[in-house]
Image (tube, rainbow, N blue to C red):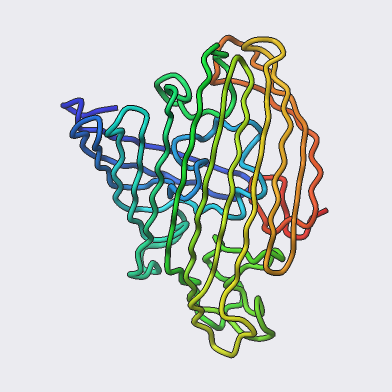
Amino acid sequence: GYIFDKRLLYSCTVWTSAGAASIVVAGNIGWRFNRGLTVMGGYTGVPGSPSLVNTFPFFTPTDRSMADNFFRPGFTQGLWASGEPVKGLNYLACVGTGLNTLNISANKIDTHLLYSGSVWWEPMGDYGPPGKSRNMYDDYFASKDVRIRLGTAYTRSREDRLSNLDTSSPENTSLYNSDGVLTFSTGAFAPGVTVQQATYGLGAIGAGIKWNGLAVNGQYYIRWLDNFDADGPLPLDSTYDRGFELSLSAFVIPKKLSLYGRGSKVYGEFNDSWEYAVGAKWHPVNTERFWLTGEVINVHRVPYTGAFTPYTAGLD
């Protein structure tokens, strides 16, 4: 909402997860100068993937895909600017404290900053109706007009393991190698060797199209880790991973029942991983904000562990 003046914006969120044993109370506040510029400060999602740009929780599947969860950044504290300076052209640029610092105490966060930005273009009109669900993946509203969304994002961050070197398990759990091992865990690259710092870079492009209840959405990712600071010799200077996700959904009963198929894949430095799934979404009441989802999923060599998703490192 707003405080005193419609240009003075605020947001407060309480988020809990039994799976992650986590409670997060987060907020932000800022000023809307005009349609082309709003400046905010506080807690936010890092816009390194289109799924983190005001899309949650309106995904086609139950949550983000395996590949998206592996590549994407997380949530941070910082400053960001956003707007739509030209009709259909949107941007969000962020400076933050790290890839994922929601549950990290302030005295452990170092002085290296994260930089991330996303730009997306909707040349044939808004991808969804104004409001929270504007960026939703499904075509719940089934407009007869074709709508297209094209976007790209880039993120760079110097990451610290946030724990002493004599601790094998790091507090920074935002980065995994493609074999499912935490990047900052002892022995991730060589026996007995621990990486203290590394530089993360991510480039992503995404596209989507909607028409009359049909929706197709896809993303492609490129991630590299380099500039390792370790307490011993490493067998490589950098890692390079890439991958994609793709989903297709269609409403067989308008605004009630949709069927979908989806898949994602990671081409990794150490392992390749893939998944595919089919599912259905049912909206029991006449709103896009409430639905029930069920899916059958097949996964191979999952490259990370998710606290509140069905993915566990190495899982088949």
Q: Is residue 40 left or right of residue 116?
A: left
Give the quarter of the figure containing the N terminus. top left
| Residue that protrudes farthest toward the bottom in the picture | 232
Q: Quadrant of residue 114?
A: bottom left
Examine the rendered structure and indicate whether residue 154 appears above or below residue 209.
below
Q: Is residue 276 left or right of residue 90?
A: right
Q: What residue is shown at x 49% (from left), y 52% (from top)? A: 74
Q: Nearer the viewer, residue 52 or 239?
A: 239
Q: Nearer the viewer, residue 67 or 5?
A: 67
Examine the rendered structure and indicate whether residue 229 appears above or below residue 49.
below
**Image coordinates for residue 14, horizontal then vertical, percent:** 44, 38
Q: Nearer the viewer, residue 315 or 255?
A: 255
Q: How many marks?
A: 0
Q: What residue is shown at x 44% (from left), y 54% (from top)? A: 154
Q: Quadrant of residue 104?
A: bottom left
Examine the rendered structure and indicate whether residue 217 appears above or below residue 258.
below
Q: Is residue 28 left or right of residue 313?
A: left
**Image coordinates for residue 127, horizontal then vertical, percent:** 47, 25
